[in-house]
Image (cartoon, rainbow, N blue to C red):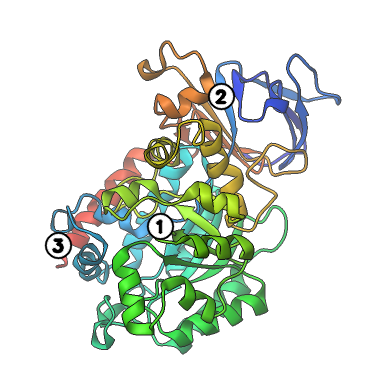
Amino acid sequence: MAETSNTLWIRNPLACADADAAGGVVIKGSRIVEKVPTGGQPSQAVDTTFDASNHVLLPGLVNTHHHFYQTLTRAYSPALNKELFPWLTTLYDVWANLDEEQMALASELAMVELLMSGCTTVADHHYVFSGALTNAIDQQVETAQRLGVRAALTRGSMSVGRDDGGLPPQSVVQDERTILDDSQRLIDRYHQHGDGAMTTIALAPCSPFSVSRELMRESARLAETNDVRLHTHLAETEDETAYCQKLFGMRPLDYLEENGWLSDRTWLAHGIHFNDDEIARLGRAGTGIAHCPSSNMVLGSGLCRTLELEAAGAPVGLAVDGSASNDHSNLAEEMRQALLLGRLRYSPSEVTHQAVIRWATQGSARCLGRDDIGGLEPGQQADLALFKLDEPRFSGAENPLAALLLCGAHRADRVMVAGRWRVTDGQPCEIDLEALMARHDSAARQLRRAL
């Protein structure tokens, strides 16, 4: 369906995340142009309307951290019931055998799965580059463009392998010059600046225990030169803290700051094990945190201090993380996990359904350095997720907005990206889902057979 300049009124939703848009939103082209109050009418003529009286209306959800390739190793028996470091060392040898066809299928399935859950902006952190897999980011760009999703893709990297005291096998380690040259190539070719950008590139050395100090510093310089963002895993486990103290003589955040990363250009995956002083420093710097509740639970990593981080000034977003540590790519379900996990640390009156929806939309957008998505304000991109409450799990629910989280919404009925419908009647547009799943499952079995 080609984009038009017609004006569309998403009319009178059952409930809306923005109380000022209780009567819906008006869309022209790729942007929201008006919020309609309860019982109101648009102030301008509209060409068409969509009756949303059976739908809960949210801004499109924004995912801030993922590893698309890991959809090929979900529920992998040798890696079950392990903490992060042994989990990684088990799976690195599997991932080292990835080829380009497998990567393309993994990326497409992950993006489709996210899209069906109401996610309109997908982010991925890909850092596995072997002889058979050198153009992974190029493939992801092509797939995102074909599916019509907004994508924040990161050029990940690993430069310290097992021979030098790191965790990954040498077959997926690259030298610093190769990494930096390819990073510049990807930025030049694909990165879009400004409002409405559909594809952005960020630089993302994998973690303190898999890259060199030089690569951390040079990545920060390259990001500043090109005005792109920085991303990495940090403070995910106590093992990581002990590793950094032993190898660098400092805690992970001190190492990050020493290498020029503590700024509002950076967002970090997990961010669990920060002390009070570090939270204050993150807040002053405006460094974002991608909160990954399911992954943190599966690997037993800990509870992110979301409210303290947000109060300090650090943007907090939501993320599904890799499908081998989650094991799904469903951001709607991740909202429920964030709500429940948050209430183990904080009062239910503090971790509300509204707060979690904010993390998954506005907070996530801030992590990615964007203010043109994540909300329903006039001028923002027309990225929307509409959910029906027509399953047994919702029967009897009095508050439709809260029901999305408390009753466990998992599939959007309609999803719009940049003013175009990408999911209708719960199905991705122009995608043969059964065929995609069959090809993807075959690729997963082929990857396991390679061991």
Look at mark 3 in the image and give the residue it sits on: 449
At 26% from the left and 84% from the top, the residue drawn is 165
Can residue 399 be seen here? The reply is yes
Can residue 145 be seen here? The reply is no
Measured as percent of width and height from the top left, residue 89 is found at 21, 69
Q: Amino acid at mark 3?
A: Arg
Between residue 144 and residue 314, name the one nearer to us.
314
Identify the mark nearer the N-term, 2 or 1.
2
- Element type at mark 3: helix
Identify the mark nearer the N-term, 2 or 3.
2
Q: Estimate the spatial distance between the alpha carbons at disc 3 and disc 1, rounded to whole Å.
A: 35 Å
Horizontal relation, residue 410 to residue 91: left or right: right
Q: Is residue 162 above or below residue 116?
A: below
Between residue 150 and residue 224, name the one nearer to us.
224
Look at mark 2 in the image and give the residue it sits on: 56
Quadrant in the picture for residue 5: top right
Measured as percent of width and height from the top left, residue 127 is found at 39, 70
Quadrant in the picture for residue 60: top right
Q: Amino acid at mark 2?
A: Val
Identify the mark nearer the N-term, 3 or 1.
1
Look at mark 1 in the image and give the residue it sits on: 272
Measured as percent of width and height from the top left, residue 244 is found at 36, 77
Measured as percent of width and height from the top left, residue 323 is found at 32, 51
